[in-house]
Amino acid sequence: MELTSAGSNKAAAGLALIDRVSTYLKTRGDVLTSVCVDRGYSMAAHENWAQHLIERGTSQHHDLGASEKRLEPADRPGIIFLDGHPFVANMPKRLRELRRPGLNATSEEKAEQARNYNERWAYAFSTNGPPTRNGAQRYRGPVHGKKVRCPNHPESMRWDPRKPLTNCTPGQPCACAATLTVKADGKRARHRQPELYGTEKWLKRYGARNLIESFNASLKNHHMRLQRHSTRVFGLSKNTILLGFILAATNMAILLSRYDYDPARPETLPAPGTQLEPLAQRAPTGSNARHPKSPGQVPGSGVAERAPS
């Protein structure tokens, strides 16, 4: 965690945390290549957040706000931006107005909408290699990637007929084979993501945020009560120390309730590196972790162990 004074710039705190994690990973020989972020960060001013990530060579997976999910014309004819990504303008109109399902949508509804986004992928520009040293990203039209057939490119019409056909008019200029460059400091760069927004691949990568949200729920509700007045001291240093105790207690409660792993009883701990298997029952969803088992109780069963006869 990165703690900072109330009212300070959250983007600066997020970047400081990313730098700290990156430094730690380098000691293990690893490299931080991507992060999964909340819209509170991704919707920050480009020069405060996304541009710094690009300069660090780190990509981000993020959701889009309502104001960011709109169609915008590009600086060149034949190209439009949908959900912050370049597409050819001659694409089916039904694929232009796509919206992700709401919070109460069923799994079937979410899967159906993801298929629509997957269909729209064919008309999207593809990245032409990694970003340059100065963070500029070059894109190329879908004909280059053999994703669509276009009447203005006869060779594409000989490809598999199952490939989508654009709405281009023969003889009229189109952007199906055009190239486009988005600079690191350009307004289009703030929405840059490795996977196309809304597709199944994007959902899978962005779904990693569920891990931290689950821990936040444990910290605020399931195992602890981190909220207003949880600490009653002033100053960043004092609150940091107290939060450290709360985090440690949360981790211990999760280990006990989910894995029957009690750090307070070192004589029962498995050897380092042992793979822990979760208990059969689900983790608690009430206010606190379950109470420690009484002596003689079989771990994870809720039944007292009988004495041997």
Image (spheres, grey):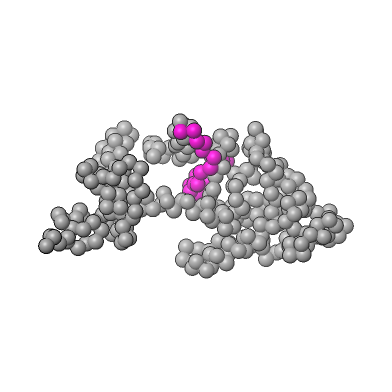
Q: Is residue 72 at all visible to an observer of this figure?
A: no
Say which residue appears at 33% left-offset and 55% top-offset: 278
Image coords of residue 46 (percent x, y) = 57, 41
Q: Nearer the viewer, residue 281 or 206?
A: 281
Residue at coordinates 72% horizontally, 56% vertically from top-left? 147
Q: Which residues are drawn in magenta?
A: 28-50
Principal secondary structure, stretch drawn in magenta = loop
Q: Is residue 265 left or right of residue 140?
A: left
| Residue farthest right in this picture | 171
User: What residue is shown at x 71% (from left), y 64% (from top)?
Assistant: 92
Depth check, front residue: 34 or 181? 34
Please name the residue shown 56% across and 34% down the image: 56
Vertical placement of residue 62 versus 24, above or below = below
281 relative to 175 in the view: left or right: left
Q: Magenta span has 74?
A: no
Relative to 271, is 119 on the left or the right?
Answer: right
Is residue 31 highlighted in magenta? yes
* Nearer to me, 196 or 145: 145
Left or right of residue 247, residue 196 in this image: right
Where is residue 305? Give x, y as percent: 17, 60
Determine the image quadrant of residue 66. Answer: bottom right
The tally of labels here is 0
Of all residues, the one furthest to the front in this rendering is: 309
State the quadrant of the C terminus.
bottom left
Does residue 166 sit above or below 243 in this rendering? below
Point out residue 243 in the picture as x, y percentages from the top left corner: 30, 40
On the image, the x and y values in percent for residue 287 come to 27, 57
Q: Is residue 173 visible?
A: yes
